[in-house]
Image (cartoon, rainbow, N blue to C red):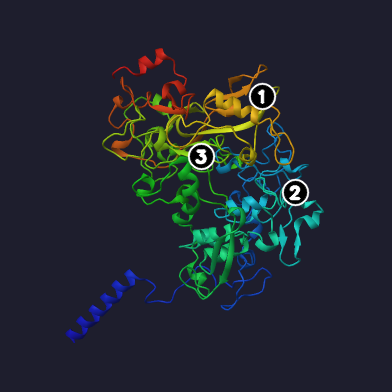
Amino acid sequence: MRNFATLLLSALSSLLLLSLLNPLSLFPQVSVHKKILLRGFDGSPLTLESGIPYSPKRTCGACHHYQRITSGYHFQQGRTDGTGKIMISDSFDLKHPWNLSPGMYGRHFAASMDSSQLAKKVNQHPSEIDKSSFYFVQHCGTCHPGGGWSEYDRRGNLYYDEESRKFGYELSRDNPLLDGDYTPLSSGDVNYGSPWDRSGVSEADCLICHLKGYQWRERAAAFRARLFRYGPAAGAGWAEVKLSEAAAGHLKSDEVKIDYGKKEVADFDRLHLQIVKRTPDENCWFCHAMADGKRRGRLWSPETDIHKAKGMDCLSCHPSDKEHNFAKGNTLQGSVRDDLDHTMHSCEACHYKGKDKRAPRYKHPFSPRHMRRLACQTCHTPFQMASADLVYDHASTGSTIVYETSRFLSNDPLDPKRSALSGNPVAWYPALRESKGKIVPVKPLIVIYWGDWDERTNVFRPIPLWKIRDLTRPPLADDDGDGIPEINSLEEIKAFLNALKAKDKFGTPIASHPALVKGGFLYHLDEKGEVEKIKHDQAGPLDFSLSHNVMSGVNVIGSRGCKDCHTKNSPFFLRKILIDSFDEKGKPVYLEAWERLGIDPEKLDRLLLEQ
């Protein structure tokens, strides 16, 4: 009897251990999601043998409110406002008419590869067109979750209806040749095409957030091959796209194959057991690692952020509502859905006002004046540990040349040419600026590009880069010896400005009054034909907010006392900030932090006194 009891206890102990290691090994899997029936674009159920891509709208939208969910700003990116009203418009911004919306879709953003401009809906001439909606879906759709502007045109019609086999322009009776949603022209290429009937539309892909192990690269391959309808199936591991290079450097698909029997990522029959309600950080990071990593040097790991180290995830600070609008702060460069700004808790809300009971209350020994003048991130994000994009030169060749922080900054804030012996060799220190009465840390992005300047209104209209590439460009010298010629000397700028008076491939003058913005100045030709440079708002750096990579302990500014900042060799007030990548001799130009903050020399002397 005693042996039986011992055996029974041992068996139960083993089962308990097994259940702790694998809680689904003893009991049937219980899903919080009911069984999912995959459906095609016509709504018909699919089987394991079906060789066609599934439709997220027909599949997930059978139970979930697809239209309400896709009204969220991640899906719309400026196409609609919070009520669902279409706000993207050719007359959205009369002062800056190249901006068609406040979001990524429609807003010209110089801090982007190829300085992309969305074509207006209605154009009078091919010269007006930079990039079509099709181009944006193909190149931005790999990260964009689908729905919104990747599904519907600016009249509210599907780009292509799989059931009726009609294009959206057929319903609105627009001329597709000069329609920004359907034009075959992009980047000056008259044969680029907008084959919506072949590509299909990009529906909102729920699994991009709600499936662990989602295959982002496979999704990207489908979009590069212009197979938008296949993107969700590829991300789930069911579609294989083989790519090859077509004419003019474009990619094409030699073969696309659907196999719902694959189970490496998603399981056709048991998909409901794999759905996660709370989006894992790695799924957020699929997209934000590229954008935020390049622009801010952001990392998200226990080693780089104290919040992650304490077990917090993205949704801890950025929860979403029923419309899938994630709580957001107020970034300096972002302008989409400003009505949702400050919907997430601030540092002060959690650590001072007690909005999160788990958050430790701050205890700082220094004067309360510091809290009034310094944002929390200024001290708690003292440096970044990954290289980031620092300079975008669109002007020298017409193709974007990127220079990273490691080229012009170092882990020594006082000497960008020197790398400290200890520490991360690619680390760099943020710039500092005033924002709403506080000093905040930022990552400036220096952008150099050509435009057409209206001297009367002082508006500087960017020139699409395809026109610069097509130009017979004057020769440039490589003044800094890095093997890449750059536009910097007055002679080179003058020659380029004269060249920009030519006509583009469609017979339209490239610019009436060509100008260059660079290093805080606008360069143009005066009445005598000589280069004149003047200060201009559009010539300054684009400052990106830094709110992540939050540190604690000895790395925080002030943790070692007043001398962290208030000393004659202050790494805070005297840190170097790049303002121009190349002066007339090819040398970088820096300001010190106190100069950019507008501190006068007399006050600086007081701030640098030994405390």
Residue kind at label 2, given as amino acid type: Asp
- For the residues labelled 3 and 2, the Cα–Cα distance comes to 30 Å
Residue 611 appears left or right of 494: left
Q: Mark 3 points at which residue?
A: 401
- For the residues labelled 1 and 2, the Cα–Cα distance comes to 29 Å
> Regarding mark 1 in the picture, which secondary structure is present there?
loop
| Marks 3,1: beta carbons within 8 A | no
Q: Name the residue under label 2.
A: 179
Q: Name the residue under label 1.
A: 458
Which residue is located at x 41 percent, y 14 percent? 601
Neighbourhood count class around disc 2 (C-alpha, 10 Å): few under 14, some 14–19, many 20 upward? many
Q: Quadrant of the N terminus?
A: bottom left
Residue kind at label 1, given as amino acid type: Asn
Q: Which residue is more in the foreground, 103 or 234? A: 234
Which residue is located at x 45 percent, y 31 percent? 440
Mark 3 or 2: the one toward you: 3
Q: Which residue lies furthest to the right in this view?
A: 173
Q: In which quarter of the image is residue 611?
A: top left
Is the residue 96 above or below the residue 130 in the image?
above
Q: Which residue lies furthest to the left in this view?
A: 2
Residue kind at label 3, given as amino acid type: Ile
Residue 266 appears left or right of 172: left
Which residue is located at x 45 percent, y 70 percent? 264
> Regarding mark 2 in the picture, which secondary structure is present there?
loop
Whole-percent x, y for residue 241 in the image = 55, 65
